[in-house]
Image: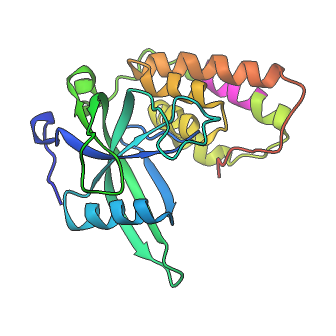
Amino acid sequence: MTDLTASRDFPSVIPIFPLTGVILLPGADLPLNIFEPRYLAMTRDAIAGTGLIGMIQPSDPNSRDFEPEIYDTGCLGRLTSHRDTPDGRILISLTGVCRFKIERELTERTTPYRQTVVRYDRFIQDLQPDSETSIDRDALIGALKRFLEAQGVQANWGGIENMTCGTLVNALAMSVPFAPGEKQALLEAPTIGDRALIMITLLDMASADTTGGSDEPSLQ
C-alpha cells in the first residue's frame, strides 16, 4: 500500500466509490460493507495495490443510473482494515486522507469500477492539523442538544465532551442523516470553522422541523 506523507505522494488517478448520503472527511473513519461485484473488485485491487479509494456522492440522489453523475469534490480514503465474510462480502474501514477535485473521468478503462483523474492542491490544508479557535463549542453543543431532544435520541455525553471540536464536527457531518446536498456542503466547507457554522445551522433547522423522522444519528 502507498505510504502517504505529502500531496505529491497522492495518485492522480484513483478509483471512486459513489454512495448517496455518505461522505468521508480527512482524519475520520468510515466503515463500509462491500457486496456489489464491481466494488468487490475495486476493494480487492485496492488491497493488492495502493490501498486508496475515493469516496464521492452522486449529484442526483434520486438517480438510478448504473453510473450516475457525480459531484466534483470527494475525499481520498486509505484502507485501514478489511475482513472477508463467509457470504462473500468485504467489511472495510477507510480513513480520510485529503479531499480532491475531479478533473475528468477515464472513459477508457479495463476495470468494472470507475476511475477519475483528480487534483488535491485546493485542499492542501487537509494535511495540517485543524485550527479549532474559530469554533464556538458552546453554540455547537447547544445546537446538538436541541437536535437530539427534538429527535428523542439519547447520547453518550461523556464521550462527546471528551471529543475535540474538530472531531465532533466531522463525526456529526458523517453520521447525522442530513440530505445529500447538505452533506456535500459540509464536505466542501473550506475550513473546520466553516464546517462548524454549517453544522450549527443544519442542526437548528432540523430541530425546528417538527415532522421528525425514523433515521437517527449514531453518537454512542
Question: Total label count?
Answer: 0
Taking depth in this image into account, of 106 and 173 the one nearest to the observer is: 106
Q: Which residue is drawn at 31% across and 67% down?
A: 44
Q: Indicate whether residue 63 is drawn in magenta.
A: no
Residues in magenta, as a range: 139-146
Is 193 displayed left or right of 50 in the figure? right
Q: Relative to 64, is 184 above or below? A: above
Q: Residue at x 34, y 59 (%)?
A: 42
* Image coords of residue 74 (percent x, y): 38, 34
Q: Tell me which secondary structure the magenta stretch mostly adopts.
A: helix
Viewport quadrant of the N terminus: bottom left
Taking depth in this image into account, of 40 and 106 the one nearest to the observer is: 106
* Image coords of residue 40 (percent x, y): 41, 66
The residue lying furthest to the front in this view is 108
Taking depth in this image into account, of 161 and 205 the one nearest to the observer is: 205
* Image coords of residue 160 (percent x, y): 60, 42
Q: Residue at x 61, y 42 (%)?
A: 64
Q: Residue at x 24, y 44 (%)?
A: 108
Within the image, what quadrant is residue 7 found in?
top left
Within the image, what quadrant is residue 55 found in?
top left
Q: Relative to 209, is 156 above or below? A: below
* Image coords of residue 24 (percent x, y): 44, 41
Q: Relative to 66, is 203 above or below? A: above
